[in-house]
Image (cartoon, grey):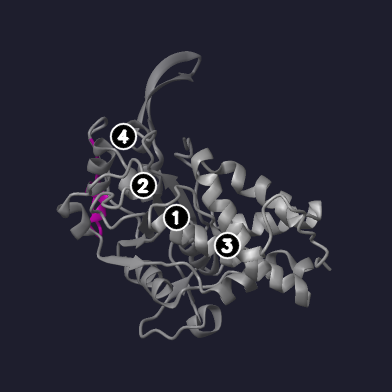
């Protein structure tokens, strides 16, 4: 929980710098995008190797520039939250993420009464939660796993979903008007319909009134193989040899098989781009692609699904899992 009631997220109240989207994001758009000329503690770090999806980037930039409520939908591991964070990083826009899994309650969001010491005496004081604090500051608030939120939490969020929507704190009879530079985003594995595939445990159906308040819904898919290979090589440059690149291509192809298997319901664990990078890093350390695959991914899979995953490995590397596939390609 944030006890940052008085903590300022940015020294500047309003974005003051016109952003060259062609130069920064390699896209041309027909509206002006402004960011902050100074950074702050709440601005995410820039990942220079990050690859932006054109349509999703335009949607997120519209969210920042035009105060649109933007939801980014896509499969696990497509980088939905990271995409929002990386846009925020380049705009110097403070950004925080809140995961709406079933552990987050209304009290966590809104706040609660707490006993504090004032002038040597114990008094009860209302401590604002993360939502009132964010709403009153230059801040992009990202609700992760929006379709896993509890009903009481969704009810609270609905109040601020309107652009310019005021937040009423019933506990203190206080009405909060949002800061001009407050922005709201969400990520979801489904498009508000609940999990019609059976792939995502714990997702709820979002009521139509809620979905209608999200003015933009962007869909983000996995990167093309070549683009993902380039990202892995940028993160683990020791693989930048001819044979090393071939190995990374096989790793990314295997990740693709797990994603297809997940979408068709064959397996329940998915290899995200982050996992591929971890695998490449572990293979570099251990000098063994097969062993590092076990340690990075296979051991996280359900026992009954491991034979399918081993078959994926065999198809990509033309070797049985357990055979020592040397990482001799690492430079």
Lower sequence index among marks 2 and 1: 1
Marks 2 and 1, how far apart at CA: 9 Å
Say above or below: 269 vs 45. Answer: above
Q: Nearer the viewer, mark 3 or mark 2?
A: 3
Q: Residues within 10 Å of mark 2 (few under 14, many from 20)?
A: some
Labels 2 & 1 near each other (Cβ < 8 A): yes
Labels 4 & 3 near each other (Cβ < 8 A): no
Lower sequence index among marks 4 and 2: 4
Residue at coordinates 34% horizontally, 31% vertically from top-left?
107
Q: Give the residue pinned by disc 1.
A: 76
Lower sequence index among marks 4 and 3: 4
- The magenta span reads 159-169
Q: Give the residue pinned by disc 2.
A: 200
Say above or below: 209 vs 60. Answer: above
Marks 3 and 2, how far apart at CA: 22 Å
Q: Give the residue pinned by disc 4.
A: 106
Labels 4 & 2 near each other (Cβ < 8 A): no
């Amino acid at each position: 929980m944030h006890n940052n009631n008085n903590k300022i997220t940015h020294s500047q109240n309003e974005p003051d710098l016109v952003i060259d989207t062609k130069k920064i994001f390699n896209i041309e758009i027909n509206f002006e995008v402004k960011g902050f000329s100074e950074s702050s503690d709440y601005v995410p770090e820039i990942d220079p190797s990050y690859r932006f999806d054109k349509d999703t980037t335009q949607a997120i930039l519209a969210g920042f520039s035009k105060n649109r409520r933007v939801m980014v939908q896509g499969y696990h591991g497509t980088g939905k939250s990271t995409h929002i964070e990386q846009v925020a990083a380049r705009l110097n826009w403070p950004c925080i993420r809140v995961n709406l899994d079933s552990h987050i309650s209304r009290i966590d969001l809104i706040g609660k009464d707490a006993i504090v010491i004032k002038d040597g005496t114990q008094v009860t004081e209302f401590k604002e939660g993360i939502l009132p604090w964010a709403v009153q500051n230059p801040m992009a608030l990202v609700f992760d796993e929006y379709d896993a939120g509890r009903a009481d939490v969704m009810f609270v969020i609905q109040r601020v979903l309107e652009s310019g929507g005021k937040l009423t704190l019933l506990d203190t009879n206080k009405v909060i008007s949002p800061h001009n530079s407050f922005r709201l985003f969400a990520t979801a594995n489904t498009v508000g319909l609940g999990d019609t595939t059976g792939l995502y445990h714990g997702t709820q159906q979002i009521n139509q009134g809620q979905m209608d308040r999200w003015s933009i819904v962007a869909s983000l898919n996995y990167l093309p193989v070549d683009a993902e290979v380039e990202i892995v090589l940028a993160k683990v440059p020791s693989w930048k040899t001819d044979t090393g690149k071939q190995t990374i291509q096989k790793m990314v192809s295997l990740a693709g098989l797990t994603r297809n298997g997940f979408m068709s319901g064959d397996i329940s664990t998915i290899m995200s781009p982050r996992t591929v990078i971890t695998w490449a890093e572990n293979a570099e350390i251990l000098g063994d692609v097969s062993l590092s695959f076990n340690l990075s991914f296979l051991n996280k899979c359900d026992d009954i699904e491991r034979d399918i995953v081993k078959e994926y490995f065999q198809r990509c590397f033309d070797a049985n899992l357990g055979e020592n596939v040397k990482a001799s390609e690492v430079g």
